[in-house]
Image: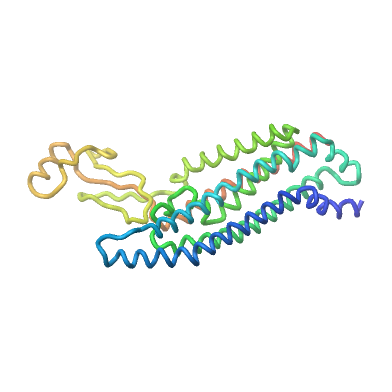
Amino acid sequence: MSAAVNGLPWTVLRLHRAALLGWGAFVAAVTGFLLWTAGVKADAARAELAYCAHHGTCSIKATLDYDGAVRLAATLLCYSFLAVAAWAGAALVARELETGTAQLAWTQSVTPVRWLVTKLALPALLITVGGAVLVPVFRHAWWINPDRLGSGWTSADVFVARGPATVAYGLCALAVGALAGLVLRRSLPALGVSFAVMLMLDQLMQRCRTDLWPSVTRTGTARFTPPDTAWQLTNGVIVHGKRVANPEYGHCDGTGTRAEQCLADHGITGYYSVYHPVSHFWPLHLVETGIVLAVTAAATAAAFRLLRRRTA
């Protein structure tokens, strides 16, 4: 029994070595790409912006290239969990149940629970280690971006790639894929379901992201413009004590008696602006990470419960 149990991790490594090597190659490739971007493209972008600061006309091609490279890396990191979900759903559990390999292992002194623990533990470790490498490297490349044209912190891809949510989504995809494999017991259906579930979870979190932490609301008798680094949610005017978002009262702009009369004619008594300052990144990010990890825990618990019921 001991020999079978001790040999199980090596069996898992041999069985899934192509996928595990692929993950290692992905981590190495993205890390190298980010380091090259931060070390080579950043200098060209800084020189270009320094030139533009003292000249009326200039090109920002190098800056756009740098920003595009950072956004590409963010997209790869953010959506790497979809590949994990597809692999976990198709190969990790379902294929072995479909071919009978799992049942054979259970007859050789390896309990179903121990089998599933090993199946999940090794990929989870590699996902965590890979994220622990990729996230700091990405944060380094993002921080030194001289002019974040499209890769600001409010970008959906950048938001995930800058913190532990990257790892949380990967672990969640692993758990959801394993659960789908146990439920469906066939590779292709499990692949499709796990991929679709994770994609829906990602879209749901994107829709709810701004509500995960209380936003800041500023009101006053004068228009307020949030900082450039803020995540602007909505703005508008206060009419008879009620907020009206994005009103078409541009002709009331300006100062003086005419502008004041225009505001009075429309019942406008003030302005408001709702936004998340850049300091809200970590509260928003950590709450989302916690939600995704809660889904991970629920999917893992459901997988073990289902396995026990089917093998009892």
Q: Is residue 200 above or below residue 161?
A: above
| Viewer-nearest residue: 21 or 209 | 21
Q: Is residue 130 left or right of residue 68?
A: right
Hey, which quadrant is residue 63 in on the image?
Answer: bottom left
Q: Is residue 159 above or below residue 107?
A: below
User: Residue extending furthest left?
Assistant: 257
Q: Quadrant of the C terminus?
A: top right
Residue 62 in the figure: left or right of residue 2: left
Q: How is the image coloured?
A: rainbow
Is residue 286 in sight in this rendering? Answer: no
Please state the horizontal and vertical placement of residue 179, each as a whole percent of the image: 70, 38
The residue lying at 56 percent from left, 40 percent from top is 201
Q: Residue at x 87, y 46 (%)?
A: 110
Q: Is residue 162 left or right of residue 44?
A: right
> Considering depth in this image, is 66 or 274 the residue closer to the camera?
66
Counting every numbered tag in the picture gives: 0
The location of residue 162, given as percent across then percent down, is: 51, 56
Locate residue 51, reporting x and y percent.
32, 67
219 or 49, nearer to the observer:
49
Residue 232, x across and y down, in percent: 35, 48
> Is residue 281 visible to us here?
yes
The residue positioned 88% from the left and 40% from the top of the image is: 104
